[in-house]
Image: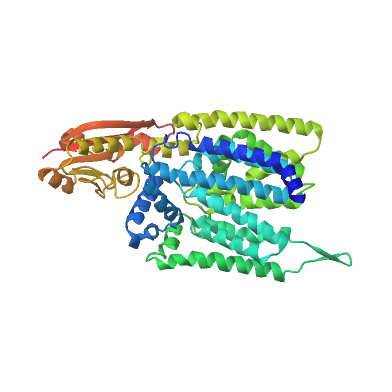
């Protein structure tokens, strides 16, 4: 009878949660490849293809100082899909859905409120911020997934003091460390869960027995870093630390230039939340923190620190700062926003539910654009630039791959050689992921990001009788095509530049991807 009563009590909550998950899935899967491949997506997908075909290269991402877990997962899936970009983004879709269950669980544990849990998960499901990155073949959605589950089991461990939950925390932290370097934040902030350890009162004095919580942390860290050290089996493990230095300033930066770039970067993070949150989310978070702090000081302070410490630290020390770098901080921010419904005063509750309704409407309007016309979605300027305007955008790559494929089908016995600018990234990796394993088609990166003459290997290919092409962005083309003696086959304009920049002055208002044919 007890189980029947529990099931009856939870049936409405379970039904609503499943509806939210279904809504989130639909929003993330519809038109999943409408956004052209992005530079890092091309790299990760290409690595996965290579790793799937060559077992000795399972640690290939270490060659660029990247952890390989995302690619390890993708390499087992990619062979089952005809579109590699869809396969890569599907991994993030699944990660996002997993984060929804974690947000529900953590909200329920912290606030003991099913309403807060449901509202928090709905915020995650609808927010354009989470929707955008859950639809990209980037590691950030997976990092967020493992991070929030690390926190879930960390809090459960603190509340129960059980070794089995400490072990589960260690496994999820280990997976996070195998995904991306910012997982270090989860490791450093895990002791914050001490706030949920029970206090014991003795003669009106509070005392805490620290032995067991510290022992539980030791168990968690031992498992997590044992998993991480599996990467030492790869030949380039040391490059992780080396590449991390390319992205962060040394600790001495704190007393040398503490406000540069902290102030502009922190302002930028607030702008991302305002634009992609979208704006009504910021209001919900602020109201929840201010009003609920008196009744739930421990819970509000914990979620606030877990959310903002990584953002502030990255704003202080990051050399490069983009919206996806704070993505793993969003789940706890969404829980803060969802906890706003705990406010009891009737006047405030009416206001809160009104703002929440505005958040839902505003989010759905932006979500619709992301699904059907992402170029017109109100993205922050630097994000719009990277995904739609500059060489990092893959606009035109799929069309060029289709053209090469049709040329191969027309003359299947003739060798086709396609040279591109650069050696990895949007080009040539963006083309290689679509043209992999097509006989008689070879895509090579020329190694040069500044094309002022036809690369020698392409000239020799044309002389040998191969059909030979060159794919290059106009910003990388330093000589008039007529002077190079190439024939323009197609051009693919990218979105017009929307921000004032040095590149705009040099290359004009619009980047264009060119496909040239090279004749003997």
- Residue closest to the eye, 227 or 352: 227
Task: Please identify the quarter of the rendering in which residue 242 is found.
Answer: bottom left
Query: For residue 431, what is the image quadrant?
Result: top left
Image spot of residue 53 (x, y percent): 32, 55
- How far across and down, in percent of the image, does residue 97 sit? 55, 44
Query: Hey, which quadrant is residue 162 in on the image?
Result: bottom right
Residue 487 percent across, percent down from the top left: 18, 33
Q: Which of 282 and 47 is in front in this view?
A: 47
Tell me: residue 328, above or below residue 472.
below
- Residue 414 vertical position relative to residue 184 in the rendered view, above or below: above
402 left or right, relative to 67: left
Q: Residue at x 56, y 58 (%)?
A: 172
179 w.r.t. 209: above or below: above
- The total of numbered circles placed on residues is 0
Q: Nearer the viewer, residue 148 or 421?
A: 148
Residue 433 drawn above or below residue 366: below
Can residue 107 be seen in the rendering of this structure? yes
Colour convention of the picture = rainbow
Would you say residue 330 is visible in this rendering? Answer: no
Q: Can you name the residue that lies furthest to the front here?
A: 1
Please identify the quadrant where the C terminus is shown. top left
Q: Is residue 413 left or right of residue 40?
A: left
Q: Residue at x 71, y 51 (%)?
A: 109
Residue 292 drawn at (x, y percent): 76, 44
Give the side of residue 231 with respect to residue 520, left or right: right
Q: Which residue lies furthest to the right in this view?
A: 203
């Amino acid at each position: 009878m007890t189980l029947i009563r529990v099931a009856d009590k939870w049936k409405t909550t379970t039904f609503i949660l499943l509806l939210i998950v279904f809504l989130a899935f639909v929003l993330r899967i519809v038109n999943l490849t409408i956004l052209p491949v992005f530079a890092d997506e091309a790299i990760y997908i290409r690595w996965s293809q290579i790793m799937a075909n060559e077992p000795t290269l399972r640690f290939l991402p270490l060659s660029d100082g990247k952890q390989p877990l995302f690619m390890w997962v993708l390499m087992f899936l990619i062979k089952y899909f005809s579109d590699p970009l869809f396969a890569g983004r599907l991994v993030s879709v699944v990660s996002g859905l997993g984060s929804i269950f974690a947000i529900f669980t953590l909200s329920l544990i912290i606030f003991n409120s099913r309403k807060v849990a449901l509202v928090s998960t709905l915020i995650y499901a609808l927010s354009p911020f989470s929707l955008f990155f859950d639809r990209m073949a980037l590691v950030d959605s997976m990092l967020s997934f493992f991070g929030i589950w690390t926190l879930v089991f960390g809090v459960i461990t603190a509340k129960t003091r059980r070794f089995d939950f400490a072990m589960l925390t260690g496994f999820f932290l280990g997976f996070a460390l195998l995904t991306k370097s910012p997982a270090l934040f989860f490791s450093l902030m895990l002791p914050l869960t001490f706030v949920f350890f029970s206090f014991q009162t003795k003669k009106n004095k509070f005392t805490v027995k620290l032995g067991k919580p510290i022992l539980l942390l030791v168990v968690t860290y031992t498992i997590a870093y044992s998993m991480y050290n599996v990467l030492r089996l790869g030949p380039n493990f040391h490059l992780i630390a080396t590449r991390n230095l390319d992205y962060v300033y040394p600790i001495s930066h704190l007393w040398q230039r503490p406000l540069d770039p902290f102030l502009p970067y922190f302002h930028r993070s607030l702008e991302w939340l305002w634009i992609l949150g979208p704006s009504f989310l910021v209001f919900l978070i602020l109201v929840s923190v201010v009003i609920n702090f008196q009744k739930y000081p421990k819970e509000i302070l914990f979620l606030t620190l877990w959310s903002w410490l990584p953002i502030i630290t990255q704003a202080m020390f990051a050399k490069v700062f983009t919206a996806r770098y704070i993505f793993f901080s969003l789940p706890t921010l969404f829980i803060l926003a969802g906890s706003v419904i705990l406010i009891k005063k009737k006047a405030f509750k009416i206001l809160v539910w009104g703002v929440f309704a505005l958040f839902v409407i505003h989010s759905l309007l932006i979500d619709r654009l992301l699904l059907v016309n992402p170029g017109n979605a109100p993205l922050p300027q630097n994000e719009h630039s990277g995904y739609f305007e500059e060489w990092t955008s893959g606009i035109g790559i799929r069309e060029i791959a289709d053209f090469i494929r049709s040329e191969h089908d027309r003359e299947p016995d003739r060798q086709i050689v396609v040279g591109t600018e650069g050696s990895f990234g949007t080009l040539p990796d963006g083309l290689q992921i679509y043209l992999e394993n097509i006989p008689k088609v070879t895509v090579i990166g020329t190694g040069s990001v500044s094309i002022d003459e036809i690369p020698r290997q392409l000239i020799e290919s044309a002389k040998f009788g191969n059909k030979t092409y060159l794919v290059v962005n106009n910003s990388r083309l330093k000589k008039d095509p007529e002077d190079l003696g190439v024939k323009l086959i197609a051009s693919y304009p990218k979105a017009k530049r929307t921000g004032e920049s040095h590149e705009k002055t040099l290359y004009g208002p619009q980047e264009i991807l060119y496909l040239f044919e090279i004749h003997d």
